[in-house]
Amino acid sequence: MESIFHEKQEGSLCAQHCLNNLLQGEYFTPVDLSSIAHQLDEEERMRMAEGGIASVEYRTFLQQPSGNLDDSGFFSIQVISNALGVWGLELILFNSREYQTLMINPISLQYRI
């Protein structure tokens, strides 16, 4: 039987460790996740600019810190979702309509190793 990969928790890099443990290898580094977060920040900035770069909302948005990462090692759920997308995987939130339509009961699932 192959061994199970487990990346020990280091600092507050929960997203990195979660992704690597799920994918069973050292696939994501903090730099990789930061890159995804910065890309999301830029996309959000561009969307906010559509309302006008002179608008109060846009100027307020620019003064806010990123919601996708911080200096402690936090990465948003959007970063995790985009990282999974690199592997063709989709994150479905437990309380989403999409999840509810799947009618999955995680308690009744059986996993085989």
Image (spheres, rainbow, N blue to C red):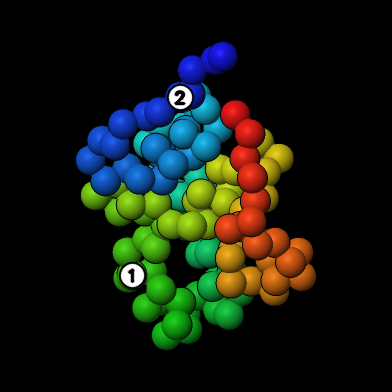
Image location of residue 28, percent across then percent down: 47, 32
- Residue located 56% across and 43% down the image: 83
Dot 2 crowding, Cα within 10 Å, few <14, some 14–19, many 20+ = few
Judge by depth and name the residue closer to the eye, 107 or 69.
Answer: 107
Q: Residue pushed farthest bottom?
A: 56
Q: Residue pushed farthest right?
A: 101
Q: Amino acid at mark 1?
A: Gln
Dot 1 crowding, Cα within 10 Å, few <14, some 14–19, many 20+ = few
Q: Amino acid at mark 2?
A: Phe
Say which element carries label 2. loop
Image location of residue 96, percent across then percent down: 64, 71
Question: Where the C terminus falls, by quadrant?
Answer: top right
- Residue located 51% across and 49% down the image: 80
* Direction from residue 112 to residue 78 in the image, left or right: left
Q: Is residue 87 above or below residue 85?
A: above
Read off the residue under disc 2. Answer: 5
Q: Residue pushed farthest top?
A: 1
Q: Quadrant of residue 46?
A: bottom right
Q: Is residue 98 visible?
A: no
Q: Is residue 84 above or below residue 6?
A: below
Judge by depth and name the residue closer to the eye, 47 or 52.
Answer: 47
Q: CA distance from mark 1 to mark 2?
A: 37 Å
Determine which of the numbered discs, if any, sits on residue 64 in the image.
Answer: 1
Q: Is residue 11 visible?
A: yes
- Residue located 45% across and 82% down the image: 57
Which is more N-terminal, label 2 or label 1? 2
